[in-house]
Amino acid sequence: MSTEQTTAANGFSYTLTRTLDAPAAKVWRAWTTPEQYAQWAYAAAGSVEMDVRPGGAWKATMVTPDGGQFPLTGSYLEVAENRLLVVGMDVPGKPVPAAMTMELDEQDDHHVRIVLRQTCDTAEERDMAEQGSTMLLDSLSAFLAEETKD
């Protein structure tokens, strides 16, 4: 697994790139199947609902390391199976959802490059989102490694 991280110097965007030891279809299922997503994405069991199609809704209750819970909702803005998922996240007080893009680029039968991108309104929001996305990629990598052992 390799990791590359880029934070725009002149804006509030970030890009995280990793090469994962899994095919694109397996990574896609991890992101788009409620049961799998709940296992690695810090979601409360039974809280994840996904209608993975453009305009389809999703929701999940995330669990923090200290046991706190907070609900998230949103919709899918773009969906291209095994290649692209643009997720809109509802943000209280903001008229437009925050969008996070997940791109998959299959390298060979056993490796895929995943790229996460997001643009935020402030440096603080960007830093928090980037930290959260880094944690998600770390957890996804561990989940995929465990799945490979089975």
Image (tube, rainbow, N blue to C red):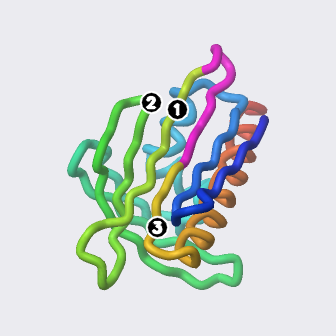
What type is the residue that disc 3 sits on? Cys
Magenta includes 109?
A: yes
* C-beta proximity under 8 Å, tags 2 and 3: no
**Residue corresponding to mark 3:** 120
Which region shows up in magenta? 107-116
Comparing marks 2 and 3, which lies closer to the viewer? 3
Q: Secondary structure at mark 1?
A: strand
Residue drawn at point x = 62 percent, y = 61 percent: 9
How busy is the neighbourhood of tag 2: few (under 14 within 10 Å), some, or many (20 plus)? some
Residue drawn at point x = 33 percent, y = 70 percent: 90
What type is the residue that disc 1 sits on? Leu
- Distance, label 2 to label 3, CA atoms, is 23 Å
**Residue corresponding to mark 2:** 83
- Distance, label 1 to label 3, CA atoms, is 22 Å
| Residue 13 versus residue 34 in the image, above or below | below
| Residue 27 versus residue 35 in the image, above or below | above
* C-beta proximity under 8 Å, tags 1 and 3: no
- Distance, label 2 to label 1, CA atoms, is 5 Å
Between 63 and 111, the residue placed more toward the observer is 111
